[in-house]
Amino acid sequence: MGEKYHLYRKYSESKDGKKTALWYYWYWDKGKRIRRAAGFNGRASELKRIAQNFIDHLIMLDTAGPQPEPEPITPQVLRLPAYGAPRTFKEFAETLYQPGALHLKRTALTDGKQISEETRKGHLSRLDNYLIPKWGGCKWAAFEQVGFSDDFIDWLVDLNRIPMHKVETPTPDPVPISNAQRNCLIETMTISLREAKRARHIRTVPEIPRFSRQSRHQDTLTDAELAKLFPEDRAQLEKVWRLEDGRDHATGILFGAMCCLGVSAGLRSGELRGVSVDQIVRQKLPNGGMLCGLIVDKALSSKQDIVGLKKATDEDLRVRVVVLSDKTMRILDLFLSTISPREGTLFLHRGVPIRKETLGKRWAAGLRQAGIPTAGRRLTPHSMRYTFNSRMRMLLNEQTLQEAIGHKDGEMTALYDRPHLEERLHQLADQRGAFNKFWDGAEAATLKQVNSD
């Protein structure tokens, strides 16, 4: 403690009579005894340990000698928002993702990339249906509180899906949202609060941790199952894929041909539902054979809008081509023979493109009516893509498979237009045998079943 500073204890009594021991110190200065609180920030400490640390700090300063005056610090004054600026989250966020919003224009100019219409509508939907109803009335101070991130996460944990046709009363059996949707809500909220910071409504953007992905791998179909699902006989194909109760009579061949194309071309649901007539290419080879292929350059969104392919950008459209096997073309031609020539979308149900939910129901019906066991398996329409990838992995080299299925890791070549893609299709002509082998096991299973009968 040294000779200059002397610690002593003094009791303080509160209004309710409670006594508290506080530590002080005294020292001589020009013949006068000076008393001060022994504690940091000018407050006497209740603990002797902290009081002793404070005295040691004073002794250290005395030993160091006089220090130069620090340079004055000019305080940074936060620029306040303009008069009439939004006072709540709702007033600010409800305009963020409207068509032509300022921040969308700025992002397109600064990043050189404009978000897709589907992405814009997704953010707008999450704001309208989830974020604004819950957080819209909050003033800006609420988002800078220490516990906001925790409150937001707790809200997401118990959050249920909004019904397709939104109603005021909750559904009888609420369904929790997935972790993927929780992360989408976090992303929309984070972007909104970044914009709020830019507009000087808040000083910091809270960090909200992401949820782990819950995605499960799809199961794939066996040779025998493919044979049951896709017979080349028109009546049998119709029987497998039509509805058991007789609804939508004569649509079995539509969904049979559609799913046959999906499984043998490795298409995503949106790509399959959006297939149009002009995407199917038939060209005669010099040796007299026929080369058939599919140009995959667009998809149908869940909102029934034509959009680009997954992860497509203006610089990389992610378009690709895939050879269509002879069996696929035979089944596809069975379907084409039942409809009048058309342009545009190929697979129409009740006169309109097939919805994602409809494809899922008819896929499940086909599996059930073909006798495919599904207990303990995850067989959704995306299983078609998994099946293609798993089977063709043994038949094609890695680069060819990546190009056919659209799993490219490197940069894509210059933007493909239709002629370029047809040239790429010709480059795959020598791989026709490999694509035809997709059905080999299924045809062998069909032959075995016929012989057993």
Image (cartoon, grey):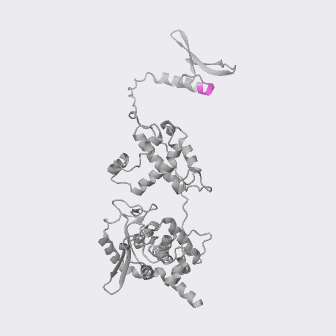
Query: In the rendering, at what x and y percent does residue 27 appear?
Result: 55, 15
> In the figure, is residue 423 to the left or right of 7?
left
Image quarter of the N terminus: top right
Query: In the rendering, at what x and y percent does residue 276 appear?
Result: 39, 71
In percent of the image, x 30 and y 85: which residue is there? 286
> Nearest the camera: 87 or 430?
87
Give the vertical position of 400 relative to 30 (above or below): below
Image quarter of the C terminus: bottom right
Give the vertical position of 453 relative to 74 (above or below): below
Using the rendered view, name the quadrant where residue 35 is placed: top right
Using the rendered view, name the quadrant where residue 280 is placed: bottom left
The residue furthest top is: 31
In percent of the image, x 53 and y 71: which residue is there? 362
Query: In the rendering, at what x and y percent does residue 169 appear?
Result: 59, 51
> In the figure, is residue 441 to the left or right of 322?
right
- The part of the chain drawn in magenta is 45-50
Query: In the rendering, at what x and y percent does residue 136 appear?
Result: 50, 42
Q: Is residue 101 magenta?
A: no
In percent of the image, x 41 and y 53: which residue is there? 120
Regarding residue 147, the answer to whether it shows in the image is: yes
Regarding residue 381, the answer to whether it shows in the image is: no
Give the vertical position of 333 relative to 201 (above or below): below
Give the vertical position of 243 relative to 299 (above or below): below
In percent of the image, x 53 and y 83: which residue is there? 236
> Nearest the camera: 452 or 31?
452
> In the figure, is residue 368 to the left or right of 324?
right
Using the rendered view, name the quadrant where residue 85 is placed: top left
